[in-house]
Image (cartoon, helix red, strand yellow):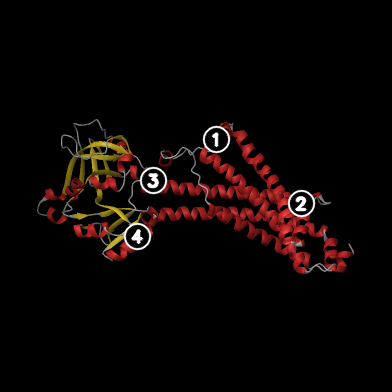
Amino acid sequence: METIIDTVVDLPLALQIILLGFILPFAAIALFFFLFKLFVRHVLYPLTGWTSFFISGRYLFSRTHRNAINIITFIAVVGITYVTAALITVLSIFNGFQDLVENMYTSFDPDLRVVAARGKSFVGSDSLLSTIASHEGIAHVSPTIQDKAMLTCYDKQYMVEVKGVRPDYLELNRLDELIYEGNYEFISEGGRPMAVLGGSVAYFINARISDRIQPMRLWAAGDVKKSLTNPEDAVRSIDLFTAGYFKVQMEYDTRYILVDFEIADQLFGMKGKISSYDIRLDDFDDAEDVRESLQKQLGSTYKVETWYGMHESLFNVMKNEKFVAYLILTLMLIIAAVNVVGSLSMIIVEKTRDIGILKSMGASKGMIRSIFLQESLLVGCIGGFAGMFTAVIIGNLQEKGGLVLMGGGESFTSQVEFFPHIMLAKDFILMFVTIVGLAILAGIYPSAKAAGIAVVQALRK
């Protein structure tokens, strides 16, 4: 398998397009046409004994006297195949992007976060910490201080989000694994305060790890009331040096710097207050359940947020984009299904005499209707399964070999080299249900028309 993937990936782009865009889909159509032919004749009909299955299979898999019918049917199958493959591929790419974004955010954000319901800080206490830590499903809790400050270095200045963390924060989130240069430390051997900077923050202010002469300086607004009597309280500042650079994604790399909890407390004058309790869960997937139960326990004074809730608008946008893509491609699938209506209508015209003979032999309207509904379903299923098969092959090549390079923005290319692609069973189920539904809708009018043909009129042809 690996050899095949490597061979396909190493092919020139033109050959990849010919192989995956033309040869693979048509080979899949031929394969499933043959498999469904065997299935209907040797499995479905013998098991059910329904004559309608046998007749619909004969009409579909046997050559007709008019080549136009075969051509239109083939066009319908090809259209359904391509749209199905495209739809599953697009949905899988959206799945890949969502997983990529989730991994980027959860590598920096906690599983849960407890913040003040009003305001941006609250008084931390041992009793509150103990209450949260003892809650079922919670593995570790750590207080943090977070606020905005002005960072200056030589003649450069930049507004940053300062996050103060304690040493035990690494038990909650492995921030040290995000460091790509330097060290994760907040106090140097000489006792000087240090900071870990987002890579883009360091770039903007030209901060260097090797600089141990000229410190950076953080500036934060002080107590406004006290500043009226003592101007020195209007602004607080603290000097620190660069310990290392971290990289997550652009939203964080351009905003955050990490400092020691005590340094943040001193800079912002918190005096026992904290910004949040960050929480790691025993099971990441239980975030919403734990959030609901912890919220009830803590009451309305505090607000409990999941990692998803912190970025809910982003994930809602991604879900909406995926839904819109599904709708657009489904419209294309409807257009392909129109060909099914055309081919069935032409088959009815050609088989009018056969329909009259069947009715004269006692076939009911329901049986005639089921023959053409089943044929519509067979056309849809052949195209649908061929499209799914094509999508699976292309998806595996993309996941394991990387057919299409990501390119573009730094926030994604720093994480992956190729377009992320994750195939989920629910997308295949959705696609199957969509195809079956459209196939039934496409077959309703032709089958009703066939069932309404009068026996005498049919036999005269």
Quadrant placement of the C terminus: bottom right
Residue 291 versus residue 352: which sits nearer the camera?
Answer: 291
Q: On the image, numbered disc 3 is attached to which residue? A: 104
Residue 409, horizontal then vertical, whole percent: 43, 40
Q: How many marks?
A: 4
Q: Amino acid at mark 2?
A: Phe
Residue with the mark numbered 2: 61
**Comes first in the chain, label 2 or label 1:** 1
Q: Nearer the viewer, residue 362 or 107?
A: 362
Residue picked out by circle 4:
290
Amino acid carrying label 1: it is Glu
Q: Disc 2 to disc 4, how far (Cα)?
A: 56 Å
Q: Position of residue 382 (x, y in %)?
A: 68, 51
Which residue is labeled 1 in the image?
2
Which mark sits nearer the N-terminus, 2 or 4?
A: 2
The numbered mark, 1 or 3, whose residue comes first in the sequence reads 1
Q: Pick the residue in front: 92 or 231.
A: 92
Q: Position of residue 386 (x, y in %)?
A: 65, 48
